[in-house]
Amino acid sequence: MNRHLLAAADLSRDEALLILDTAEELARISDRPIKKLPTLRGRTVVNLFFEDSTRTRISFEAAAKRLSADVINFSAKGSSVAKGESLKDTALTLEAMGADAVVIRHMASGAPRRLAGWIKGHVVNAGDGMHEHPTQALLDAFTIRRRLRGESTSHTGISSHGSPTGGLDGIRVTLVGDVLHSRVARSNIALLNTLGAGVTVVAPPTLLPLAVDGWSCEVSYDLDAVLPKTDVIMMLRVQQERMNAAYFPSVREYSRRYGLDTARMAAMPEHAIVMHPGPMNRGVEIAAEVADSPRATIVEQVANGVSVRMAVLYLLLGGAELGGTNE
Amino acid sequence: MHARRGTDSFPDKRVFEPEEIRRALTRIAHEILERTNGAGDILLLGIPTRGVPLARRLAERAGEFEGRPIPWGSLDITMYRDDLRLRPARALGPTELPPAGIDGQTVVLVDDVLYSGRTVRAALDALTDLGRPRSVQLAVLVDRGHRELPIRADYVGKNLPTSQREQVRVLLAEVDGEDAVLLDERDAFPDNSKKPSGSEPGSNQGSEQKGALA
């Protein structure tokens, strides 16, 4: 592992699989009477959130606490940032307080990388602007692997659930929606490619970045044509807070052409699953009946997020400090 | 004693042949049954990596003698180690317990080598987080001495007096393709080695016939 987790695109296949396999073992402690491990005792993890976020922050907080780390939550609202403090000064303050790791969400793409150059602790990107959200991509890959590759039997034969192993080779994933503004889409496309899955993005032309031709994914404007060839469909949120310009004529038209309703879900193969990074706009990109169907993994994704973030924190913080990369 | 095979990489002594391992495990299986009055409520837990196949073999053997299956599982102790910060973060091994859990059971921890006792200390901590066994016992294939904690084994395959410079390696068919216990001199090839081969003591790959002949 590198010292930091800044982008899913930085991960090699082996590193990504190490995180997923570690998360698979850590997921089991949620079945235990004592859901806590002593591993990061005495380490401090700072959640530095410049953007509103509930689930990601809580997920990181739960992950750090299950590993016995001390957690300090810092949100920009009502803090010295509101008084005009720069990111660098905030970072140095946190460093002086002994932060071993900083989990940062920032509205500016690249802020985590800047932060990594300023502080000695480990930096985990929890979403930066329109760039990346690597732990979301990891938890999505983890969820796909569990649902579609979770049939192997365990090696001792006593546990009922086997641990899936290996990559996502041959799985066809379709991302639908606001790819232009979505860091989740960028991270997912990078990681899914690394793990061997095939990716198709479906969106109105206005919601695709100009550079999409250079991405290693297929592009389509016709959702219905792609559905029968889809094992996993990921519905991206229509980010109304970023919609200063009109990217599509009306929410209703978007929903008709790119929303996932029960009829469209029925057009997918029997085993196909429906994912959404949350928070959902029910009735816009995803119909309520679809979101509540057993094929939807939305609640599972939240639970898996804690396991994956535990794995990331353990692999970054659990071992020795050795500059450079190791195993 | 010096039956060296082409697959073995560097000068080492085979201190345990496959037959001896088989006999030692058979004896331990009998001892476990004797000490626990027929193993009514025991659970064998192997510590990954090589404790797990040992636990399975012991459970199968004891099960044959008693005519009923003996439960076994695995217990990963990585997250409880006291030397985590001395090395890069390691991959985790599996922890698999029977659905009934460990409460009220006699848990027999199984590992390949007992050395400092720190692994067993970590395993005891891990057990505490999983439940409350009635008692905990320890079975090891090799006890090489040099304890750093007040821990001892209840069942020992072989007591192997070693110096701390030496390295004991247990090979098991399930993991390594063959059964053997090897004793290596760790400093067999010091940095300013007189030995001609450019072999690294840490690597266990490739053939070192040149070094062996020299």
Image (cartoon, rainbow, N blue to C red):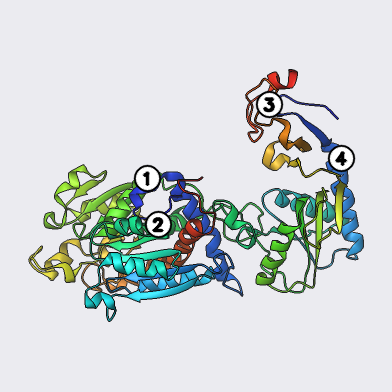
Counting other residues with Cα less than 10 Å from the Cα at mark 2, is it few (<14), some (14-19), or many (20 or more)?
A: many
Whole-angstrom CA distance, mark 3 to mark 1, is 43 Å
Nearer the observer, A321 or B6: A321
- Residue B78 visible in rendering: yes
Left or right: residue B8 versus residue A210 is right
Instruction: Determine which quarter of the picture holds residue A106.
Output: bottom left
Which callout, 4 or 3, points to the residue nearer the camera?
3
First-in-chain label (4 vs 3): 4
Question: What is the three-letter code of the residue carrying label 1?
Answer: Thr
Q: Secondary structure at mark 3?
A: loop
Q: Secondary structure at mark 2?
A: helix
Q: Which mark, by number, is residue A217?
A: none
Image location of residue B28, percent across then percent down: 87, 53
CA distance separating discs 1 and 2 = 11 Å
Q: Amino acid at mark 4?
A: Glu
* Whole-percent x, y for residue B198 in the image: 62, 24
Q: Residue under circle 3?
A: B193
Question: Viewer-proximal residue, B41 or A324?
Answer: A324
The residue furthest bottom is A78
**Image point 47% across, 54% down: which residue?**
A19
- Chain letter, disc 1 residue: A
SS class, disc 1: helix
List the residue tagged with mark 2. A138
* Residue identifier under label 1: A194
**Are labels 3 and 2 on one chain?**
no
Q: Amino acid at mark 2?
A: Leu
Task: Tell me the kind of residue under disc 3.
Answer: Ser
Q: Give me the residue at 44% from left, 57% from top.
A: A142
